[in-house]
Amino acid sequence: MSRLRTAAATDTGYLRATNQDVALATNDLAAVADGMGGHLGGEVAARIAVEQLLEAYRRDRTTDGLVAAVGAANSAVYSRSRSDRNLRGMGTTLTAAAFIGDEPDGQLRLALVNVGDSRAYLVDWRERRVHKLTEDHSVVEEMVRSGELTPEEAAVHPHRHILTRALGIEPNIEPDCWELDLEPGSRLLLCSDGLTNELGEEEIANVLLDEADAEKAANELVRLALHRGGIDNVTVVVLDVLAGETPATTDDVVLIPLAVPGKPSRTPGAETAPITEAVALTPAVSAKATAATTSAAAAAAAGGSRPAPQPSRQAAQPVAGQGPLAVPMTTTPSGAPTVPSSGAAPRAAHGRPMVLVPRVKGPKEHRDRIFTIRVALFVVVFVAILGSTAGVVVWFDKASFYVGLDEGYVTIFQGRPGGLLWLKPSVVERTTITPADLLSSNVFYLKQGMEESSYQAARNLVHSLSLEHAVIVPSESTTTTTARAPATTVPRRGTG
């Protein structure tokens, strides 16, 4: 009699405002979901998926039941996304492992499903390493499988976080699925990409091999990922296969992070990325190819504990809905080999278009922190430039004067003729001189505004205009010629 012991750990990380990962750990089911779709959408999608997965799996604890549970989780996320416009475009990855029975030889049969780029690893105690059981559903992973990129190039590719499959994006989903027969002492790891983006497989293996306690191993993996940068949410679930123990009588369910009742929701949309396009990344599966795949899987199963022969590069290419054709053989601490069961080959799926889901991650594109020091400095400099420009305009306007006509009298204005930007000229002084008291040529220039450099210069100009008319056109009198009284000016009070 064998059973599972699970332990989970998660952390928001240093640069994210929210934790969009969700981990589930029970006596017979473990899962990791990594949500996407803004501050609110990612959290909602991941939690709906995991809760629906648990509920549906409890109704049918078989491999088919687990696959059906993934479909139910996808439908739940998709329906919620379509019914709430604030959650449009949300989705989530999902990697889950479920106990589906014991074998007569004491092995534990486990079903494994995967959608997205969260991963599952199996510890190889003999070689002191881990084997990656799942294949990422991402653009760069497709390019690696087709030979366009090397794994090293894929690790730094700018599109490495664009997924080709995720829950909640389409009405139906086809997960990769395996069945594994595990010896007592076997250990598996489920994790989000927040762990694998920071730690290599060798570092992950060292922790899983050196730390016997599952809970301590999970916490240590999260700690190391945070120590390396903690750019993204980090979530891990460690599963140990225990032998000769009585099955648990209680059905404990650990779901982290805990949902806080009454938690105020953030404004959605800050991190929401729309679906960009739907393209067929792989050709549809023909009946001939499907038959060949089934034959290869049956041949691998018939080989017993012997490793399956390596397929050619072309034959190894997975199609839509398919993962690798075989899971690597591993060993337990006692040295006994652990091999996949006859159902280890993932189930074939129908060819279909794959939806590209933009997903912003990485140190160069963080959307959680909008107001940074750089933004603050930019705002300060921008405001300072605007203020300086406005100050120069106001100073120039206040230092300018001109003489013109206002309400039929010669008037001194402060400002520019016609105004400057938003500043209109203001009346400083209105005289008693009318256009009839001036030469017609001067009246023409006054209508356009005669500019002067100061208020005193403007007063002197008014006096000169008055004297020119008196000298050139003397006053007519029938008897005597009298001297014309000098022009007078009346200051206008209350003007700026």
Image (cartoon, rainbow, N blue to C red):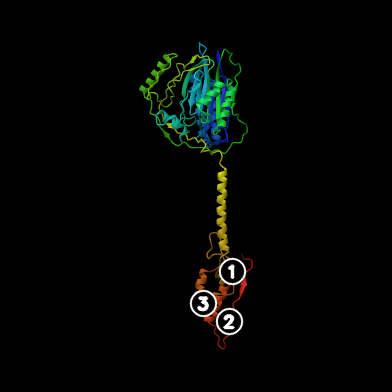
Residue 484: numbered disc: 2
Residue 163: numbered disc: none
Residue 206, x across and y down, in percent: 54, 23
User: Which residue, as the protein is rendered here, is positioned at the far right?
Assistant: 493
Residue 254, x across and y down, in percent: 59, 24
According to the image, label 1 marks what residue?
Answer: 455
Q: Is residue 60 visible?
A: no
Which callout, 1 or 3, points to the residue nearer the camera? 1
Residue at the spot 50% in from the left edge and 76% down from the top edge: 440
According to the image, label 3 marks what residue?
Answer: 439
Res. 428 image quadrant:
bottom right
Q: Label 2, label 1: how many angstroms apart (C-alpha)?
A: 25 Å
Quarter of the image that includes the C terminus = bottom right
Mark 2, secondary structure of its residue: loop
Q: Earlier in the sequence, mark 2 or mark 1?
A: 1
Which amino acid, by three-letter code, is at mark 1? Tyr
Is residue 478 depicted above or below 19 in this figure? below
CA neighbours of label 3 inside 10 A, class few (<14), some (14 to 19), many (20+): some
Which callout, 2 or 1, points to the residue nearer the camera? 1
Which amino acid, by three-letter code, is at mark 2? Arg
Q: Label 1, label 3: how many angstroms apart (C-alpha)?
A: 22 Å
Q: Is residue 121 visible?
A: yes
Mark 1, secondary structure of its residue: helix
Q: Nearer the viewer, residue 64 or 361?
A: 361
